[in-house]
Amino acid sequence: MTESEIYNYDVFQSKAGESSHFRSITHAGDIAPDFSLPSINGGPLTLSALQGMPVVIEFGSIT
Amino acid sequence: MDQLARDFAGKAVFLFVYTREAHPEDFPDYPAHQSFNQKWRHAEALQQQQQRTPRRILVDNLEGSVHRLYGGRLNTCWVINDKGQVSYKSEWASEPHLRKALEETLCIGEFGKPRGYKDFYQESMTLIEGGRPPAVT
């Protein structure tokens, strides 16, 4: 299976260790990992370009 | 979350990163993504559902690189302060808890130790009520 096939499962999967992994990465006080993504509102957006104002990031989907 | 974004308009930027489908088995119109274009269309459908959302919707790549960089959990929420530091992270996007965390991010610069809360895992830079979940009154 390709990486995208594993990531995009057909049926919901809650993997063991997901929660502990979430807890173990990037902690409060750490610099947030930078990223740049396209926006359906127009243009790409780079996290580090938003410094100067707090940013709320939510991860999710329509389902 | 939309109301929260409206309440903090001009004080914080709200982003929604579109990930894999959480429950494709329950939504025949939104199956697992086979291509980035399909993922983009689903994100557009979300925007149409939430027509007046003040949040910017970003679309991750097909492999979920940014999602996985931030832990890969579904429905997680992060607050980044004006210096680019994580001031709050939560395993679940709870509006009242996020509101409290955001208020503290805007008002208080004191560092706190990571804490685990009763209902779901959260961390905050601020010292919140002796380690108990933030009040949600």
Image (tube, rainbow, N blue to C red):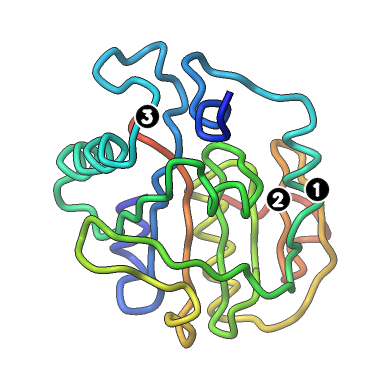
- Residue at numbered disc 1: B116
Task: Tell me the chain of label 1.
Answer: B
In the image, B15 versus B11, the foreground residue is: B15
Whether residue B137 appears in this view of the structure is no
**Residues at badges 1 and 2 in contact (C-beta under 8 Å)?**
yes
Is tag 2's residue or tag 3's residue first in the polypeptide sequence? 3
Q: Amino acid at mark 3?
A: His
B68 to the left or right of A35: right
Nearer the observer: mark 2 or 3; the answer is: 3
B115 or B134: nearer the eye?
A: B115
Q: Position of residue B63 (x, y in %)?
A: 50, 41
Q: Earlier in the sequence, mark 3 or mark 1?
A: 3
**Disc 3 is attached to a residue of which chain?**
B
* Element class at badge 3: loop
Q: What is the CA distance from the residue labelled 1 to the residue labelled 2? A: 6 Å
Callout 1: few (<14), some (14-19), or many (20+) C-alpha neighbours within 10 Å?
some
**Residue identified by numbered label 3:** B33
Q: Which residue is mark 2?
A: B122
- Residue B110 placement, left or right of B47: right
Amino acid carrying label 2: it is Gln
